[in-house]
Image (tube, helix red, strand yellow):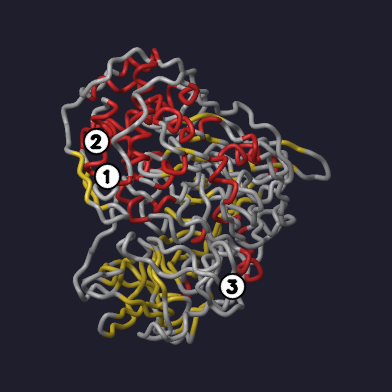
Amino acid sequence: MRGSATDPTSAPRGRRTRKAAGGIAAAALLLPLLGAAPSQGVGRSAAGDLQGTFASAAAEYHVPQSVLLAVSYLQSRWDTHAGAPSVSGGYGPMHLTDAHTALAAAPHHSEGTEDARGDSARPARHPKVSVPDAAALPDRLETLPRAARLTGIPAAELRTDPAANVAGGAALLAAAQKELGRPLGSDPAEWYGAVARFSGADDTATAASYANDVYDVLRTGAKRTTDQGQTVTLAARPGLSADTGQLKRAGLGPADQDGTECPASVSCTWLPAPYEEFGDNDYGNHDLGNRPASQGIDYIVIHDTEGTWDGVLNLIQDPAYVSWNYTIRSTDGLIAQHVKAKDVAWHAGNWYVNAKSVGIEHEGFLASPDAWYTEAMYRSSARLVKYLAAEYGVPLDRQHILGHDNVPGPTTSSVPGMHTDPGPYWDWRHYFELLGHPFKRTAGKNGGLVTILPDYAKNQPVYTGCTTAGEPCPAHGSSEVRLYSDHDENSALVKDIGLGTAPTTGVNDLSSRVSTGQQYALADRWGDWTAIWYLGQQAWFRNPAGQPTAVNASGLVITPKAGRASVPVYGRAYPEKEAYPTGVPAQAVSPLSYTIPAGQEYVVGDELPGEYFYAVTFATDSHRVVVGKDLYYQIQYGHRVAYVRAADVDVRSSAG
């Protein structure tokens, strides 16, 4: 998201906050204390066999084992995260929430000084942070204390012992089933209402979306090795149907979905960002547009909030703050839409990208590797992105589905302050599998390109600075691969001259990192090492055959035209001066501090004309879309994308 933060309940750099409209309660967490007797047979002894743990807890609380497994899969994919809490304060395989305990000590990071609007035609926008009251966390984030009361298991044990945690989840499901007047038993079709209540949602649409996902898991089945090295299996039941009518008796309210632009398969609520004038020719917190009729939507940008749900929803309602199109909640995947797709949100720090993109915030913290995202949020996000991509013709690849950390600085001076979320712990591999476009080998050994594709769980580069400058972050799976100046891990890290600082292993330092799904032109190979062209230089990474971090690919690349020693690189694709009509000041076509030397190649994402959206006034009658004749290519230049003028380069196919 934006800036630095000092409190986990707030997204960075808000000027002021108000009470969020339509606050989210949690009827499901206020159930009477019904359920099985306190657990006697489940404890640490069962923690070494997670599959057996689910069987024991299911038997003890008379919950179908398959339902317990499917709910846990949607919460955590059966991972334990070594007792560390999720972004919303959830613990263990069942994601039992204890937010007042967990979030009080949640770490944060500083992303720099980015102007989220990124439009050099008007003053930079740097709203200040305002911190909501941490004591105001909603009851939906406190399922773990209730599980402790139901089971008699101490809260500390529920947080750290997987077997106790699973028992707590089973007790909560059983209590919900009894509250709904449904019998305990082994038929998973009879547990739809209890699963919906387990979500913690207070509206029927969100609860139904969550329950539908659980039953999708039940039908398709799942098998994976957890973060503790245990294999857990849920057998598929493709013909399973659920009694969805139970939801009518669950006592939940309707959701305000009027006007939202979301697929039917998710729960989506409308919480508009204000378009409001507040004096001194200033207004907020987005611009009215006419997309995609006047200009295309080419990108979807993935962010993390650097704050918890309720604090972030306060900020988006502040006209003096900045904006984004959607926010997704971690606990159950609820989506809130704030800015219509036709309008331009201020989210990516680059006006050219803002004008052609949709921004999606995910409840999370970059520098907290164990503040893990739930499967519910990943799935909800993937459904939203698939819907938007189909609606607006956005290709499902890493040239168009960008992280905020892939958006280039629009000018040389802005490069050091650009943001770095969602960071190295966002699981791009799993995300694109959910999008239905998994990354894979697309060429033989002579393909000429590589797609970065490490095994997320096994790929654990050392990062520093998550909590204390220079100190190692907890070991954790990562989507990113480190780059060196030679085929030797003792060689220097690759330097990003645009940052003006020596490269480090800092969690926010993107100098020498590539990310899953990104593609680069092959420069060389040496044993277990692969070299690519990156930021105008040759960069090496370990890519052993036994545990590859990249696969061969083919595609289009650009290279400087013959006779050119180098060509400039741009952070935005603006039109030539002659394209601007009277009344619209021409914007500088200014290169960044980077170049592409002769002989180097970079992967092409798009060919596109120079374009500028002029929208510097509250009234829309002066807004203009300026399209030039000069063409550009979007390329994968470093960790971030960039642009080159078509007149400066040649394009060729790198096939294998």
Label located before the other in sequence (3 or 2): 2
Whether pointer 3 and pointer 1 mark residues with C-beta atoms closer than 8 Å, the reply is no
Q: Position of residue 488 (x, y in %)?
A: 37, 85
Q: Would residue 285 be found to the left or right of residue 516 on screen?
A: right
Q: Amino acid at mark 2?
A: Ser
- Name the quadrant containing residue 471: bottom right
> Is residue 649 toward the left or the right of residue 227 in the image?
right
Residue carrying label 2: 56
What residue sits right under mark 1 in the picture? Answer: 46
Q: Amino acid at mark 1?
A: Ala
Neighbourhood count class around disc 1 (C-alpha, 10 Å): few under 14, some 14–19, many 20 upward = some
Sequence-wise, the earlier of marks 1 and 2 is: 1
Whether 176 is drawn above or below 117: the answer is above
593 sits to left or right of 438: right
The alpha-carbon separation of the residues under discs 1 and 2 comes to 9 Å
The nearer-to-camera label among 3 and 2 is 2
- Give the residue drawn at x 59%, y 59%: 109
Q: Amino acid at mark 3?
A: Leu
x and y percentages locating residue 559 in the rendered image: 40, 77
Image point (66%, 61%), residue name: 113
Numbered disc 3: secondary structure: loop
Percent position (x, y) of residue 139?
54, 30
Mark 3 and mark 1: Cα distance apart in space: 58 Å
Earlier in the chain: of badge 3 and badge 1, it is: 1
Q: Is residue 360 visible?
A: no
Looking at the rendered image, the disc whose residue lies closer to the viewer, 3 or 1, is 1
- Label 3 sits on residue: 592
**Residue 553: percent from left, percent from top:** 27, 67
